[in-house]
Image (cartoon, helix red, strand yellow):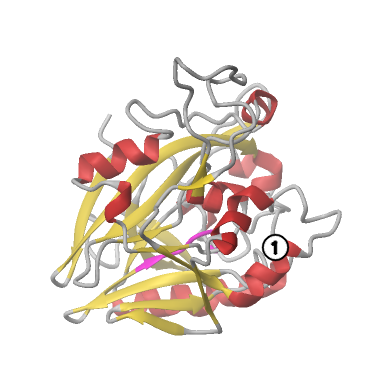
Amino acid sequence: MALVTSFRVGSLSCHALEAGCQRLDGGAMFGVVPKPLWERRIAPDERNRIPLALRCLLVEHDDGPVLIDTGLGNKESDKFRDIYGVQNAGRTGPTQLEDALAEAGFRPEEVRWVINTHLHFDHAGGNTFIPLHLPSSPSISHGGRTVGAAPQLSFPNATYVVQQRELEFATHTNERTAASYLEHNFAPVGGAGRWRLANGETELVPGIRLVPTPGHVPFHQSVVIAQGGERACFLGDLVPTTAHLPLPWIMGYDLEPLVTLETKRALLSRAEADGWLLVFEHDPAHPVGRVVREGKSFAFAALDTPSGAG
């Protein structure tokens, strides 16, 4: 299976990287949408879970490679991996993300910037890693990770970027949010002094802009790549799959679903009007596409579908 889908935004080369997959409850993923409707789009397994990609985006930039989101990482227990149906083991590195990077022609130490849309475990888990077991190690955990080893930065030469208030939100969790924010995914970044914290809409480097897209969590951000009159947007969890393009199809996981609704309306209206490419982080089949109007809402258009087709 190919781990890389490449496309261009102006002169910028972009690579959607397949960092593995997970399975989450379909009812939670579609909120108030009835199961007879959502299961036509993504079929659940016997545990009512639907398959979801762990997709990241690498942008080749003059300032150095920019990686957007980092997948789930390798630090979680076997029980965790079973509950969430995680499949992301790497052939040559800690996870499949490193394999995908290699297929795109890059090594982790070459990455200059790491952008997190937010700090949930399936978006920031690959920020850090636990070294794989070596034969000389005295003991190992289930899955081959060294027992007691401290998480290390996955991208040792990168500056990590997130919204400042998202980091604050992640470090002051409550009973509803604690299960999604796992400290070992982001605390080591702070310990190493490698955060660059954004405050609102920010151009990180020429042509790569951080755009607040609240709703899923209050300080979620999407990333817009613009060059040569063309634009692409890495949506993150604003629109996790193509099935979530209709405006009312919003995850039960979203903390502020009515905010999500208005954020989606504004961003998708602009994307449709200006012909943006959209990168879907969790869609199991469609890494990249466009959005078209469908009545008062929106629908997916594959890249080989003529503009305006439904």
Please provide the residue range marked out in magenta. 233-238
Residue at label 1?
Answer: 170
Residue 192 location, x and y as percent? 53, 61
The residue lying toward the viewer, choosing from 230 and 30, is 230
Location of the N terminus (image quadrant): top left
x, y (%) of residue 44? Answer: 60, 30
Judged from this view, the residue extending furthest toward the left is 11
Q: In this view, does 18 lie to the left or right of 13?
A: right
Q: Which amino acid does label 1 sit on?
A: Ala
Count the marks.
1
Does residue 304 appear anywhere in the picture? Answer: no
Residue 77 lies in quadrant: top right
Q: Residue 86 appears in which quarter of the rendering?
A: top right
On the rendered image, what quadrant is the C terminus found in? bottom left
Residue farthest to the right?
A: 175
For the point 22% across and 68% down, the residue is 61
Is 237 a magenta residue?
yes
Q: In this view, does 229 lie to the left or right of 96?
A: left
- From the image, give the main secondary structure of the stretch colored magenta: loop
Vertical arrangement, residue 151 with respect to residue 221, above or below: above
Residue nearest the viewer, comparing 269 with 50: 50
Write the residue at 61% across / 19% down: 142
Q: Around disc 1, counting alpha carbons within 10 Å, would you say few (fewer than 14), some (14 to 19), or many (20 or more)?
A: many
Taking the magenta stretch, the answer to whether it contains residue 129 is no
